[in-house]
Image: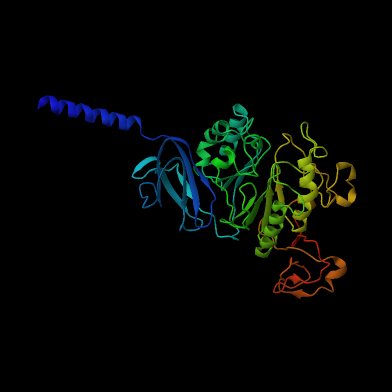
Amino acid sequence: MRQSIGRNLAALILLLGVGRADAAVVTRGPYLQMPGTTSIVVRWRTDVATTSQVAYGAAPGSLTQSVDDPTLTTEHVVALSGLSPDTTYFYLVGEIGVPIVGDDGNHYLRTAPPTGTAQPMRIWTIGDAGFTGANLNAVRDAFAAFNGSSSADLLLLLGDNAYLTGTDAQYQTAVFDTHQAMLRTTPVWSVVGNHEAVSSNSTTQIGPYFDMFSFPTAGQVGGVASGSESYFAFDYGNVHFIVLDSEQAPAAPGTAMLTWLEADLQAAVLQDPAWIVALWHRPPYSKGQFHDSDVEVAEINMRQFVLPVLETYGVDLVLCGHSHNYERSFLLDGHHGLSATLNSSHQVDPGDGTRPVTAPTARPRRGRARTRARCTSSTAAAATCATPPSTTPLWCAACSNSARWCSTSTATRWRRSFSPAPV
């Protein structure tokens, strides 16, 4: 009897020991994706396959709600829904009934403000930050010191985020380990760079890049559904963001990406966001030491085929990486050829791009009133104002605020104009 009890006790101790040895450990994340006004995605990786649970609530120790997934996996992707806009939630991640990390002041998320809401936001954008070590750490720490105790609203990665080939292991070191503290409180978005394209294929959506990120394909957080995680759109407050693929998605009139781009921009301008921001990897204008936009086909295609669409619909800002240098230029419009074809007609104002930036080149502060576009001067007086037609609508500054649409077929250019003048 004593021997039996002893054997059973030993077996119990052995089982408990095995249980402790096999307890799941979070090896990546948690990190946040696709922030919407009422939803967000939480992702993390564990060393062993477990079920998934995210518990969340108004304060640490008060995580009163949870979302569970009984599927055994090491790649945990949990979507939270039914949240309140512009609201902070504290959270933990783990397996069902077994917390692993979180439920403290360092694990929280914030939903997006209502679409169209004008309020300050802080976005950290880095490109070609894939080399790990002292330089990358210094950049990270400098932003953290500048930003203080509050978290940024968004993190935008402009491609080549992990050298040299964008593998899962390289991403672990350059992104998920280096930026671990930020990623658990700040949603991350990314574009495909040429180094990601070595190990991942944006046409087939196969590869480590597409395995580790969750991006909207069906317009879940604003914009028109793209059907692709390499190009898509999203809204955050009064900003409409457009992510494009300068690497593997064909960029020419009539291609899937450009057809989607124009459809998304047509829908976006109807909502009149204060800002429209586009981001992709390869810059349309660059004369860097390693990259020349007169030579590299991808840069030429983006300049020749994508810029005319962005200019037509009045996109405010383009963010790119790739060139590993600091360049300033004239404020340009309508220049889509090689650099030798640039002339004064492409310069929007006389600023030469040097500091300090003169008033005409400065972007007005957020919230300044403006009209989205104007008809050409020769047709504005004769323009007929109407409700948006079924074809591409054209917003005319000559029209009143109550009926802002210009039906003239010759008003083919969208333009931003500002009132009062930029300062």
**Residue 108 visible here:** yes
In the visual, does 61 lie left or right of 328?
left
Instruction: Examine the rendered structure and indicate whether residue 67 appears above or below residue 298.
Output: below
Instruction: Please identify the quarter of the rendering in which residue 11 is found.
Output: top left
Which residue is nearer to you in this view: 18 or 84? 18
Which residue does the image show at 77% across and 58% down from the upper left? 312
Q: How is the image coloured?
A: rainbow
Instruction: Please identify the quarter of the rendering in which residue 393 is found.
Output: bottom right
**Residue 359 visible here:** no
Residue that protrudes farthest toward the left in the picture: 1
Q: Position of residue 188 (x, y in %)?
A: 57, 44
Which residue is nearer to you in this view: 372 or 243? 243
In the visual, does 78 lie left or right of 195?
left
Which residue does the image show at 58% across and 35% down from the upper left? 140
The N terminus, quarter of image: top left
Instruction: Please identify the quarter of the rendering in which residue 417 is found.
Output: bottom right
Q: Position of residue 173 (x, y in %)?
A: 55, 31
Which residue is nearer to you in this view: 385 or 250? 250
Q: Position of residue 278 (x, y in %)?
A: 69, 50
Instruction: Examine the rendered structure and indicate whether residue 355 appears above or below residue 371.
Output: above
Residue that protrudes farthest toward the front in the picture: 204
Residue that protrudes farthest toward the top in the picture: 3
The C terminus, quarter of image: bottom right
Which residue is nearer to you in this view: 206 or 189? 206
Disc tally is 0
Q: Position of residue 325 (x, y in %)?
A: 74, 34
Which residue does the image show at 76% across and 74% down from the upper left? 385
In the visual, does 153 lie left or right of 365?
left
In the visual, does 97 lie left or right of 32?
left
